[in-house]
Image (cartoon, coloured by chain):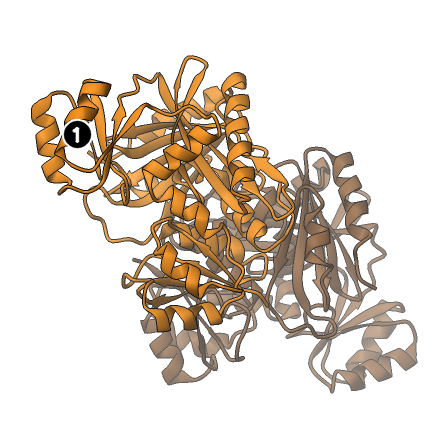
Chain colours: A brown, B orange
Amino acid sequence: MTTIGILGGGQLARMLALAAYPLGFKIKCCDPVKNTCAYDVADVSLIAWDNSQQIKSFIDSVDVITFETENVPVDFLKTVLVGKPHFPSLDALKIAQDRLFEKQLFAELNIKTAPYFVVNDEKDLKQGIEKIGFPCVLKTRRFGYDGKGQAILRHAEDAKNSWSDFMGKACLLEGFVAFDGECSLIAARDRQNHIVFYPLAHNRHEQGILIESRAPWDHGVLNIKAQACMTGLLQKLDYVGVCTIEFFYCGDELIVNEMAPRVHNSGHWSIEGALTSQFANHIRAITDLPLGDTAPIGHSYMYNGISKMPDKKQILNISGAYYHDYAKVPRPGRKIGHITLNASTGSQLEEKIAALLLHIPD
Amino acid sequence: MTTIGILGGGQLARMLALAAYPLGFKIKCCDPVKNTCAYDVADVSLIAWDNSQQIKSFIDSVDVITFETENVPVDFLKTVLVGKPHFPSLDALKIAQDRLFEKQLFAELNIKTAPYFVVNDEKDLKQGIEKIGFPCVLKTRRFGYDGKGQAILRHAEDAKNSWSDFMGKACLLEGFVAFDGECSLIAARDRQNHIVFYPLAHNRHEQGILIESRAPWDHGVLNIKAQACMTGLLQKLDYVGVCTIEFFYCGDELIVNEMAPRVHNSGHWSIEGALTSQFANHIRAITDLPLGDTAPIGHSYMYNGISKMPDKKQILNISGAYYHDYAKVPRPGRKIGHITLNASTGSQLEEKIAALLLHIPD
């Protein structure tokens, strides 16, 4: 029996494991943090990803490796993963963990991003602001997630504070995109270059954290453009597995915000809302199985539980509601679960959303 | 966090666990057999169910108890489960583990079964045959499953051989039902007497083992009759959880074959083919959560892998195919997995079934 090794043991690993078991795979995770939330559902080892001996023995104990996060020590892993199948490639992770590399790749692919300026010191920051103008967004090149490592700059004072907050880390200064909204495209590519696309999800963030997604978001033009971006990216990287691109849109124009070389929060609705979930398709892709149908089942809405979740009983009283508790200790700003609503029609979905919102804790 | 304890660690426990995790529950199983197939996905202890000390400490370590099989030592468990919530009741299990008790209960509820005669010795057997006539079916009262413990008797020689095969165990002799076909109804009842019904499944057995189920089986009259039987049964037993009744049908007439006080093989299609699976609804019922919508998603077909499974890659090449591998060691007559096909229309489903059947190993 094939054992899949996952670097990471958080909620993405947890949901990957739950999708892998029916297909008959064993799951082992390794995570440098104790008692992560995949612990209840899989064999999770406490391993620092750069601990050569421990990571080697973890790799030896599995048949194929995948990742729940791009923030792994890529150069080190290149030396220990020789000869062990691993998807996506470390090169894809390396690009996705650095905003500059992402921007450069998208430029190569003729895909539009926000204008940017590389900031390594205060002089660069000043020059960047002169070039891009206020408002603009200072982002650390690496390790940013859920709004961490980014700040909107509206005047010189902001620039000074943020630079000091980020402790002089390598940054990009990006032009502020006055977008109409945000959406994301999730796709899976198998080893034979078959690509399947999920429908576009329409997303809303608050303070950089994804709050809600609706899918399918039925926007023909943007969907075609997004699929073209995705196809270029996947083929350029010879990518295997599930990949996500987050976009801003203004009218019919798409601007890439960032990519995630993995299953993504904006695709959690697919567990109940698509014929094959993003998790099942990632597992299929990395184990060389045919990809499953990504067609939506009716209309779905996903609500993220940030630091608290609404009452389980009240939520499950809503017909078509699904409750996902990650078994995590709540902390401010921490995603501890999500809820999916599913309905046959868009208007029924909006009724269910209204019912859900009555139960959101303050 | 609530921990659910399951007596049993086979594929039903495995699928219950996979349905319980998203809802935020922990799962512990206990099974007297080593390395059962829930082992990969849950905390499974090797415990003989009548080992007083071990079973008590297992019960102490969980918040609510349920069962993947009716064949548990009911009288012993009654003494150790005092004060610990457990669903369904041990009385329901006690009835379901003995064909005579089942028949008596159905008679009380005015639900039609095959005619029967209680057989404790060879004299009874002779009398029973005189009364019921050939062909008839000799069945052990207890521990029969997948066609084990039953034999069709067509003449006196069969009777002699079967009685000797069953080693004089307490039996029922049943009239042979010349049925048109077989179907089953699965329902869930919560602690507030809400009942939800899955659509009827149309089933086909070979040598007593379920081979395939199709759902929804759209037979209005039989559906109404089956729901009436189920409602009577659930209310009589004050039943909480998922319950199954298997029927023979002749035209518009239903004859109860047997009940199963648990999730059932003929409901496995509901994982992908219903808005809420039988496993999720059982977990909801026993943890006092509202029951989920049982409406079907299109049309589903389930094929059981008996001792072998078709090739995973070939099967997953069929759009709308889902592969469930229980991670069991194959043995003759052993269920080691199942495949579900899902399609928007009945005729599309038949096309997919034809494609599946091409890949069934001899």
Callout 1 secondary element = helix
The image shows a total of numbered marks equal to 1
In this rendered view, identify the residue nearer to me: A189 or B95.
Answer: B95
Residue at 47% over, 67% down: A90
In this rendered view, identify the residue nearer to me: A333 or B207.
Answer: B207
Q: Looking at the picture, does residue A362 appear above or below residue B137?
A: below
Q: Which chain carries label 1?
A: B
Position of A249 with respect to B87 (left or right) is right
- The image position of residue A234, as x and y in percent, is 53, 52
- The image position of residue B288, as x and y in percent, is 62, 53
Q: Quadrant of residue B167?
A: top left
Residue at 61% over, 48% down: B191
- The image position of residue A269, as x and y in percent, is 63, 49
Residue furthest to the top in view is B251
In this rendered view, identify the residue nearer to me: A301 or A238.
Answer: A301
In this rendered view, identify the residue nearer to me: B325 or B190.
Answer: B190
What residue would you read off at disc 1? Answer: B125
Q: Quadrant of the C terminus of chain A?
A: bottom right
Residue at 48% over, 82% down: A48
Q: Looking at the picture, does residue B351 appear above or below residue A248?
A: above
Q: Quadrant of the N terminus of chain A?
A: bottom left
Q: What residue type is labelled 1?
A: Leu
Q: Looking at the picture, does residue B100 appear above or below residue B222?
A: below
Q: Can residue A231 be seen in this view?
A: no
Position of B148 with respect to B343 (left or right) is left
Q: Looking at the picture, does residue A93 appear above or below residue A18?
A: below
Q: Is residue B81 visible?
A: yes
- The image position of residue A207, as x and y in percent, is 80, 66
Q: How crowded is mark 1: few (under 14 residues within 10 Å), some or many (20 or more)?
A: many
